[in-house]
Image: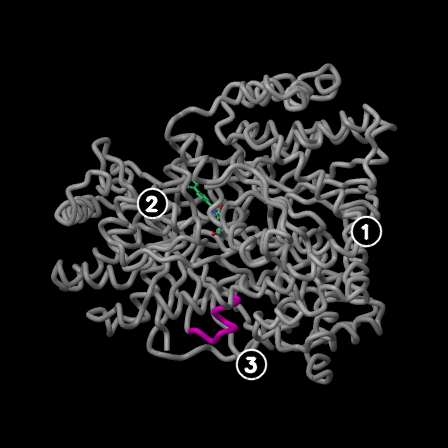
Amino acid sequence: MEKKILDYLTLDLDTCTTDELYNEVLSMTKEMSKIKKEVTGERTVYYMSAEFLIGKLLSNNLMNLGIYDELESILVKHGRSITELEDYEPEPSLGNGGLGRLAACFLDSIATLGIKGEGLGLLYHFGLFKQVFQNNQQTEHKDAWLDRPSWAMPTDFKTTFKIGDVDVVSRMYKIDVLGYNEYKIPLNLFDLESVDEKLVSDGIRFDQEKLESNLTLFLYPDDSNEKGLRLRFAQQFFMVKSGLAWILENHKNHLEDLDKHAVIQINDTHPAMAIVLLYQALLKHGITNDKALKIVENTFAYTNHTILAEALEKWPIHYFESVDHSLVPLLHELNEKAKSRSNDSKTLIIDEQGLVHMAALSIHFSHSTNGVAALHTDILKNTELKHFYDLYPDKFNNKTNGITFRRWLQFSNPELTKYIESLIGSEFKENAMELEKLSQFAEDNTVQKEIENIKYMNKKRLAEFLKREQSIEINVDSVFDIQIKRLHEYKRQQMNLLYAIDMVEEIRSGKIPSRPLTMFFGSKAAPAYTLAKDIIHALLVLSKIIDNDPIVSPHLKIVFVENYNVTKAEYLIPACDISEQISLASKEASGTGNMKFMLNGALTLGTLDGANVEISELVGSENIYIFGESSETVIAHYEHEDYVSKVYYEDNVRIKRACDFLVTEEMLALGNQTNLDRLYQELLNKDWFMTLLDLEDYINTKNRMLEDYEDREAWNTKVIHNIAKAGFFSSDRTIAQYNEEIWNIK
Ligand code: 26Q
C-alpha cells in the first residue's frame, strides 16, 4: 500500500506548503475512494435533509480506506503529520445541531451496513455562521468553508425550473461517504448555479430578496422576519424540487411502481413539500389521483424531531402560490382527502388562517411517522400528535437515535479504543453490543486505573487544543463538567449558570470544594434569539468575574468554547467527567450528545428526558445521576398553567441569591444591563421552561456527584458500566431498525 500512496504524492514533502500538501492528499483520497463499491439493488432509500453536519472528513476517510497509519508514517519521515492537515481542513458547516449530526451518523451507518441509499440536501456556501465573542457577546460571521478545495465534487446532473417567475438552474454535487467496510454511498447536495457570494459583505447580512443569487448562500438565514421566512421556504422548495428531479430521473422507467423502488425518509418536515411535488409529478405522468396518492404514501416516511409547538412548521398557503401556483389546488385536494378520513379539525392540513401544517401533511401522506426516543414517541402518541395517532395507530413507531462509533469512539478516542480492544478483542467494532463484555472488568482496579489514565490524557489533549485555539489555560486535575449543545431555553444552560453562581457564593462564604471544577460550555444561539444571547452574555461575564477573583478562581473556572462545532466536540467529549443533559423533562426529543459522552466514559447528570430515560434503564439508577420533575408532572403544569417561578424564588434563599446575583453591581460593572435585566426578569416572571422548578434538586445532585467523584474506585466502576452499556446507541442498530421496519431494502 505504501507504494500506492507514494504514487499519488508528487510534491517535495519536505518543502511544500500545508495548502499544497492538503490539496494533494485530498485528491489522492478522492481517487482512492474509487476502490470502494457502490451498493447495488432494486430499491433505494433517499435520506432527505436540509442539514448534514458531517464534520471534517480527511482522517475519517483515510481510516476507512485503511491508509491512515501508512500515510502518517510517510509524512512523519518528512517532519509532517496528518494533524497538520486535519487542523488545516475546513469543517463543512452544513447543520445546526442534533438533527444535522444525526443525518451524518445515519449516512455512515447506511454505508457501513451496505444498504443502498443516499443523502439528498443543499450545498450551502457559508453554512451556519461562525461565532466570535466580542465584549462578552456573540457576534456572527460568514464561514467561507468552500474557499478551499472541498470533498464536494460537481456532477453533470443539472435541472432547470422556476421559482415564481425566477428561472433557476440547480447542479448536483457529490460527496462520497465511505463505510467502514467495502462500500460507499453518495451524499448529493444541490447548489444554485447563479449563486453570488459577493452578495454577502459584512457579517452575515445580504439581500434576502434576490433568490436567483442567494438561495444556497446560508443555512437557514434569519427567520425572524417575513423576508427571511420566504427565503427559507424558497430554499426548501429548491431542495425538494432538485432532489425529486434526481429521484425521478433514477426511476423514470418505474414511476407506476415507484414505491417498490424508492423510499424517501424526510428528516423532520423541512423537506415535506416533496410530498406535494411528487403527487404533482405522478399526475403529470398520467397516473390517476387515487393511485398517485397511494404511491406517494407508500414512498414517504417521516421522522419527527421535536414537540416544541413553535418548531412545528406552518407555512402560509400564499407562499406555495408564490413559488408554484399549481401546488395550491393540489394542497386543497389533499386537505379534502384528509377531511374525508377524519372529522377531527386537529388533523387538518390547512387551517382557518390559511396556514399549511407540514407535520399534518407528512403524517397523512406517508406510511410511517417515527419519534427519536421511546419517551418522545410516547409523548407524540399521547399528547402532541394524539389525534393523528388515534387516526393512524399503525403508522406510528419509535426509532431511538444512535451515533456512529467510528467517529465518536474509534476516531475521537483512539487510546480508549485500543485499550478496549486489548480487553475484549476487536469484535465490538463490527457489533457494538460486544461492549457488554467490559462489565466483567468494572471492579478491576488495574482496568479502572488505566481508564482513568486515558481520561487524564484526553484532558491534556483538550487543554493543549484550547491553549492553541483560544489561549485558555485549564487545570487538567480538575473535574471536567461539560454542556455542549445549541443554546435553547428548554436545554436550560441558564440552570447551569445559576449553579455556577451558587458555587461562587458558597466558595466566597468559605465552603471550599474538595477538588477544582471546570465547567465547559459550547453553544451557538440563533442570531435573532434574544434570550439565548442574554444567557451567553451572562456566562461570559460570570467567567471573567471568576477569573478575576483570587478566592474563587483556584476552585472554579468557566470555559466558553467559541464557535462550537463537530471538531471541538471530538476534543471535548473524550475528556469529560460530567455530561450535562438537563433539559426540562418532555422537551428534548432524544439528545445524541448524551450517548457520545456515555460511550467515552462520562457519567450523566440529567433529567428523565429523551434518550436519558433509556440510558438510565440500561445502566441502572446507581450508575447515573437523575434529578428533577418527571415529564408527566411537567406536562401537567403546562396543562393547568399552575407553575409560578416567583414562588420558588421567594421560598428558597439560595435560589433567590443566585437569581439576584445576575443584576448585582459586580455583574453590571462588566456586563450589559439590558441583557442581564431581561434574563433576570424572565426567570422571575415567566421561566417558561421551569428552571427554578428543578434548580434546588439540580444543585444538590451535582454536589453529591462531585462528592462521589472523590471515591475514584466507585466512580470508575460506574464509568466502566456506562461504556459497557453504550452498544445499544450505535447508529448501526438504529439504521438496521429503520431498514427492517420501514425501508425494507434487500
Ligand atoms: C423550524 C421552523 C422554522 C425555522 C427553523 C426550524 C427548525 C430548524 C432546525 C426546527 C428544528 C431544527 C432542528 C432540530 C433539531 O436539531 N432537533 C434535535 O434532533 C435531534 C436528533 O433527533 C434530537 O436528538 C434532539 O433532541 C432534537 O432537539
Q: Indicate if the residue with disc 1 has its beta carbon within 8 Å of ligand 1.
A: no
Q: Residue at x 31, y 39 (%)?
A: 315
Q: Nearer the viewer, mark 3 or mark 1?
A: 1
Tell me whether the residue at label 3 lies in contact with that at label 1, contact meaning CB atoms closer than 8 angstroms.
no
Mark 3 packing: few (<14 Cα in 10 Å), some, or many (20+)? few
Residue type marked 3: Ile
Q: Nearer the viewer, residue 55 or 244?
A: 55
Residue 401 visible, this orientation: yes
Residue at the disc numbered 2: 382
Residue at the disc numbered 1: 464
Residue type marked 1: Glu
Mark 2 packing: few (<14 Cα in 10 Å), some, or many (20+)? some
Residue at the disc numbered 3: 35
Is residue 114 a member of the stretch shown in magenta?
yes
Q: Indicate if the residue with disc 2 has its beta carbon within 8 Å of ligand 1.
A: no
* SS assignment at label 1: helix
In the drawing, does residue 433 fall left or right of residue 425?
left
Looking at the magenta stretch, what is its main secondary structure?
helix
Residue type marked 2: Asn
Instruction: Indicate which disc, 1 or 2, sits on the residue closer to the N terminus.
Output: 2
Q: Nearer the viewer, mark 2 or mark 3?
A: 2
* Label 2 – label 3 distance at C-alpha: 49 Å
* SS assignment at label 2: helix
Is residue 197 a member of the stretch shown in magenta?
no
- The stretch of residues the image draws in magenta is 108-115
